[in-house]
Each structure stands twice: as structure tokens, then as C-alpha cells.
Image (cartoon, grey):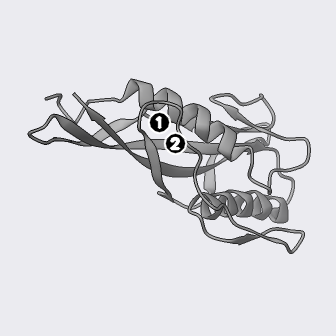
């Protein structure tokens, strides 16, 4: 058995990265003309999603018939880079991140157009029998870095939990 403290589900990491990027870009609160990029941010502005460790194996149970059930965690950050000029702009960025987090947790969110949106479920992962079970925030949207030129990085941290089953 692999050392679960360091075991990474490589195939799961790739499948989750692709599915999560697509899911994040379906969030109805993304500013017009913007998209969320994978592990990338422009110098002055943009929104990016960054996996922090890949899909870490939390548990790995095998029964006597050789059926294996794994639970994996995929921690990630969403970073919103901007040069806000006012407190209200900073609050809108923080609110965007918090609404995104709520939406990923399958909670209803009300956006600026006063319309309620709710994510009905998670996408299928195109790798084996992996199934997304939940996404949860590990902190609220917050200022993560401020630079001399006025650019700021605001961040939301979350973890996606999925299960994988297979027979040896």
C-alpha cells in the first residue's frame, strides 16, 4: 500500500483539473469578457485557478475481492488579480469570490442582476470511475497579496473531494 501522506492520484488530478476549469468558467457571476484560466494570470489583471498539490489520496480501502475504494482531495485556489481603486471595488472582488465558493458548494447565490443561480450538480470526470462528491471552501475570499503598483491578488481556497472505485 502506498504511503497515503504522499500518494497522489495523477490520473485523477488531470481529470479534475479539466473538469474544474470548465465548471469554474460556467459560473454566471464571471465579469463580462473574462474567463478563469488554469494556473495562469496576466500581469495586471485576471482570474486564475491553481491546484495546490494535485489529488491527494485521503483513504484507500481494498476488500477481499480486490475492489478498491479511494477518497481523494484536490485542494485549489482561485486568484482574482486587479488594481481596485476604491473600497467598494475591493468588496465586489471579495463578494465575487465568496459567491463563487457558495455556488461550488451547491448553495443558491443571488448575483447583481437579482437573479438566483444554483449549481445542480458536478460534472462527470472523464477518467475511470471517479465521481465528484463535494467542493467546500477552506477560507473566505481575502486579500492575499498587494504590490507596489496597486495591483492586488484576492484569493479563495477550496477543496474538491471525489471518490474512485475499481477492481484489481
> Does the rendering let one see residue 146?
no
Mark 2 or mark 1: which comes first in sequence?
1
> Does the rendering let one see residue 89?
yes
Q: In front here: 103 or 143?
A: 103
> In which quadrant of the rendered view does residue 44 lie?
top right
**Residue beneath disc 1:** 52
Q: Is residue 118 left or right of residue 86?
A: left
**Residue beneath disc 2:** 76
Q: Is residue 153 left or right of residue 92?
A: left
Residue 65 on image: x %, y % = 13, 37
Residue at position x 17%, y 31% in the image: 3
Q: Residues within 10 Å of mark 2 (few under 14, many from 20)?
A: many
- List the single residue furthest toward the front: 65
Q: In front here: 72 or 53?
A: 72
> In which quadrant of the rendered view does residue 40 lie?
top right
Residue 97 on image: x %, y % = 68, 57
Amino acid at each position: 500500500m502506498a504511503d497515503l501522506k504522499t500518494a497522489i492520484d495523477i490520473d485523477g488530478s488531470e481529470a479534475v483539473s479539466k473538469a474544474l476549469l470548465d465548471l469554474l468558467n460556467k459560473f454566471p457571476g464571471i465579469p463580462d469578457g473574462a474567463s478563469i484560466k488554469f494556473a495562469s494570470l496576466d500581469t495586471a489583471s485576471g482570474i486564475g485557478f491553481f491546484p495546490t498539490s494535485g489529488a491527494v489520496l485521503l483513504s484507500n480501502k481494498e476488500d477481499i475481492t480486490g475492489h478498491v475504494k479511494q477518497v481523494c482531495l484536490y485542494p485549489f485556489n482561485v486568484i482574482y488579480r486587479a488594481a481596485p481603486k476604491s473600497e467598494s471595488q475591493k468588496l465586489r472582488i471579495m463578494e465575487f469570490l465568496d459567491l463563487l465558493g457558495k455556488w461550488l458548494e451547491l448553495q443558491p447565490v443571488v448575483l447583481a442582476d437579482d437573479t438566483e443561480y444554483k449549481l445542480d450538480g458536478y460534472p462527470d470526470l472523464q477518467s475511470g470511475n471517479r465521481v465528484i462528491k463535494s467542493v467546500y471552501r477552506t477560507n473566505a475570499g481575502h486579500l492575499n497579496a498587494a504590490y507596489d503598483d496597486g495591483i492586488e491578488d484576492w484569493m479563495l481556497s477550496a477543496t474538491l473531494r471525489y471518490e474512485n472505485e475499481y477492481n484489481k
